[in-house]
Amino acid sequence: MENTKTFRKLLIWQKSMVFVTKIYSETKLFPNYELYALTSQIKRSSISHSNQFY
């Protein structure tokens, strides 16, 4: 089982998680009226892209 690979070891996945974390931090600064519109869409999009790597 030592040769088992995991997506968490992929550099691209690690970088995408850093990106998602930054997105979440930045969207906290958005106005409240954007909470369920633009903010939600941006967060879902960033998660979707990181999920495509595994």
Image (cartoon, rainbow, N blue to C red):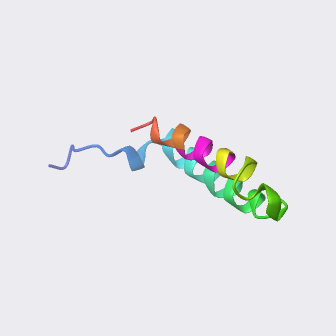
Q: Residue at x 44, y 36 (%)?
A: 53
Q: Nearer the viewer, residue 24 or 13?
A: 24
Classify the position of the C terminus by image quarter: top left
21 to 53, vertically: above or below:
below
Task: State which region is magenta.
Answer: 42-47
Q: Residue at x 79, y 55 (%)?
A: 34
* Residue 20 locus on image (x, y percent): 62, 51
Considering the whole magenta stretch, tell me its main secondary structure.
Answer: helix
Q: Nearer the viewer, residue 8 or 26?
A: 26
Query: Is 46 part of what is drawn in magenta?
Result: yes
* Residue 35 locus on image (x, y percent): 73, 59
Q: Residue at x 21, y 43 (%)?
A: 3
Q: Nearer the viewer, residue 23 or 44?
A: 44
Locate residue 37 relative to residue 52 in the image: left or right: right
Query: Is 14 part of what is drawn in magenta?
Result: no
Q: Quadrant of residue 32?
A: bottom right
* Residue 19 locus on image (x, y percent): 65, 49
28 to 3, vertically: above or below:
below
Q: Residue at x 76, y 64 (%)?
A: 28
Locate residue 48 relative to residue 34 in the image: left or right: left
